[in-house]
Every structure is written in structure tokens, then in C-alpha cells.
Image (cartoon, rainbow, N blue to C red):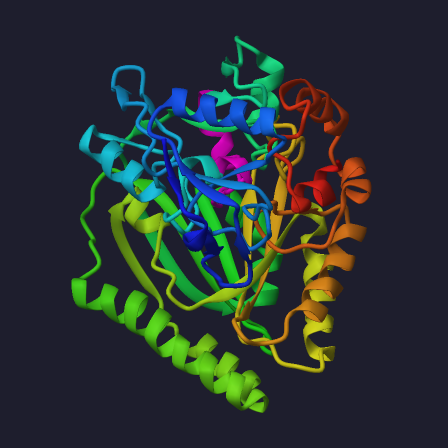
Amino acid sequence: MVATAPSVTAWSNWAGNQRGTATAVLRPRSVDDVADAVRAAATAGERIRAVGSGHSFTAVALTDGHRMELSDLDTGVRVDVDRRLVTVPAGITLRALNRLLAEHGLALPNLGDIDAQTVAGAISTGTHGTGAGYGCLSTFVESLTLVTGTGEVLHCSADEQPDVFAAARVSLGALGVLVDVTLRCVDAFVLLAHERPAPLAGVLADLPALLGRHDHVEFYWFPYTDRVQVKTNDRVPADDRPLPRWRGWLDDEFLANTVFAGACRLGRAVPALAPTISAVSARALAERRYTGRSDAVFCTPRRVRFVEMEYALPRDALVPALDALRGIVDGLPFKVLFPVEVRFTAADDVWLSHGHGRDSAYIAVHQYVGMPYEPYFRAFEEVAAGLGGRPHWGKLHWRDAASLASAYPRWQAFQQVRDRLDPDRVFASPHLDRVLGS
């Protein structure tokens, strides 16, 4: 076990909107190190929060006790190509996992658009991609091992400790420290990506057919316009239309990051230009089709800093939610500089998954760093909550345990598992006290 002196315990997340100082930083190298640290904390009345890559916008990783970083944790890697299973340390990043799987001719069935998160962080907050037939990444978990609040090392799956398994796949780190995860994979595959501008009304009118025709669908609405950028991804047998290197650099690095960052800085300096910037952005994005390895198509670089809130809604609530959102944006006393992202997932059985028990449409609202956002996000949250929405656990929201309990049918079952695995609340924090209760 490696512990860090108090002078270097400051921490901030990727967006820079969450900052804190732990009493110590723990860097376990083995499962025994994790268990010993948890038992010591329980005896001393200390708290521990395990943290990942800092890509959550909430205070979920902040602690008033010890911070545990899992980047040095070595539980070994096991790849079963025949059964398409991989077991990895919970602190491995999705980027490293994707490389590992590719080396063995495997891939995850779906991914979000950022690959910097750790596996533990991604599944603990319900990270998801898009695809009407796919649940969040937690639905790919075959089994997991966690160290509970009593220092017990507990292995669970659908057959072994099934109640813990149903709770721990999305748990906000409230049940224990995830130390390894076994994931169900698929044979490596190629995607055909198609990105095109379109009118919002036309996309919404054609949405059921669009979701039925494609494996993965998402779109971005540009505020102050009636335009969207539609992105579809479909499995194809061959990587026969790779994106030229210059085009990838131009679109994904120069335009999507360098130029967009400049536009955001301009919009922050001269807010009245925001509608014009949004309109130009909506028209500037050209149509393109290309093929590529699945993770290379799913994941794209994100270098422009922002804050975000995302809500999972019953799918039939998407249109009224977007209608209300357009009115909110038009009525704000400040301007919105980022597009609104819409994605789709299938129902799942994970107790605290945003998609538990229902097919979902996700609406994500963003704002450039340094710009006001709280009135915008709070106004949309009121709309989304009224439509039965559930906030993404890793993204900004103002809900508390009292308002969230009714949104999740298995809320009380989760609390019972939490009481059993962490009776002394070793893994609690001010944020968890708010969203899960103390």
C-alpha cells in the first residue's frame, strides 16, 4: 500500500467544477491492500472513496476522508476468447481495455463517446452509449469482485450473490471498492458511420423508423436553430471505407476541438454571437460516411471543457421534453454554446440503472466552462423530473434521496444491500448522503 502525504491530496475532476482535498491518498497494489485499508478505516472511523479518472461532473468522487486510487491495483488479466469473457482490474481505463480486447479479436458490444473513464467508474455511474437494443455498459458485466465496508472480499454474479450483483453494477461506489470486473464481449467488429445534417422536425417524425433501421442512433440539436447532426453506426463485414487521416484530423481534431474551442471562447466573450455561432456550426458540418474498428468509431476526442447534465426519459417523453427545452433555451438570460445530445438505450434489470425497466431516450445538456449554467440545467431538470426522468449519476443534477426513491422500483432493495455491505458507511460522503441518504 502506498499512501500520499497530505500536501498532495488536492484533487479536481476533468471539468474542473469539483475540487477537494482528502486526508490521505491510498494507492493499493493488491486486493489485500484494499481490504486492509478498508478495515483500518472502519476501525478508525474514517471514510474512503475510490476514484477513477475524474470524468463525472458531480461530487461523487469527493471525500472528506481517504481517497483511494486504483491505477496501481494489479489483479491480473484473464481473457477467455472462446467464451468471449475478459477479467480486468477495476482501475483499467476503457481505452486500455479496448486495446486489450482488439489484440484478442474481441470488443465490447457498445461504448459511449469517451474512453478515458476507468471500468469501475464507468459501470458505477451507469455510463452508456447509444443503441435502442443495448443497455448501459453495466449490462455487459458477467461478474465482479468488491471489498465491502467490513473488509470482506465478495465475488458476485447472476448466480452467486445475485442481489449484490443487481445492486453493485451501478452503485456509485456505495457498496464497496470494485477490484475486478468480468465483462461479456463479442467478436471484434467494424462499424459503418454515417453523419449528416438534417432538420429536427424531420428526424423526430422519422425516429421510430430510424431506430429500427440502425444499430446505433444519436443526434445533436444546435440551440437557436431547427437543425441537428444525425449520427448512425451499423455493423458491416469489412473495413473498406476508412476515413482518410487528413479528414479525421480535420473533422475530429481541428473542427470539433480547435475551431469549436475558439468559437466557444468567442461566444463567452460576446454572448450575443451565440445564435450565429450555433447556426454556422449546424451548417458547417458536412455529411460523411466511413468505416472503422468499433471502438475507434464509438469514441472520439473531447478536448473542449464543459459541464453537463443528462436525463434518461421514457422514450415517448422525448418530443415534449425537447419542445420544453427549446423554450427554456430561448428564455434564458444568457446564451448556450454547446449542442444538446440525444441518445437511446434499451431497458435493463440493474437496480439503479437509469434504464431500469424501460426503454429510454437520453437528453444531455452542456455548457462551456466559465459560462453560467445552473438556471439552464435546473429549468430542464424540472421538466425532465416531471416527465419521469432519472438523472445520470455521473452528471450534474440537484435531486436528493427523497425525490429519487420513487424513480427506482428497487430503491429499497438497494438500501438493504447497502446496509448489509457497509453498515458503518465507510464509503459514504456528503454527496452520497444527499443522493442515497445517510
State how many labels appear.
0
Relative placement, left or right, of 430 versus 98 is: right
In percent of width and height, residue 180 lies at: 40, 25
Q: Quadrant of residue 331?
A: bottom right
Above/below status of 181 relative to 288: above
In terms of depth relative to the viewer, which is nearer, 431 or 370? Answer: 431
Please report the residue visible at 51 percent of the width from the left and 84 percent of the height from the top.
Answer: 267
Please report the residue visible at 31 percent of the width from the left and 49 percent of the height from the top.
Answer: 192
In terms of depth relative to the viewer, which is nearer, 347 or 354? Answer: 354
Q: Quadrant of residue 92?
A: top left
Magenta span of residues: 123-144
In terms of depth relative to the viewer, which is nearer, 194 or 347? Answer: 347
In percent of width and height, residue 392 lies at: 61, 47
**Residue 161 seen in this snapshot:** yes
Quarter of the figure with the C terminus: top right
Please report the residue visible at 71 percent of the width from the left and 58 percent of the height from the top.
Answer: 321
Q: Residue 134 magenta-drawn? A: yes
In percent of width and height, residue 49 lies at: 54, 38
**Residue 276 seen in this snapshot:** no
In terms of depth relative to the viewer, which is nearer, 249 or 204? Answer: 249
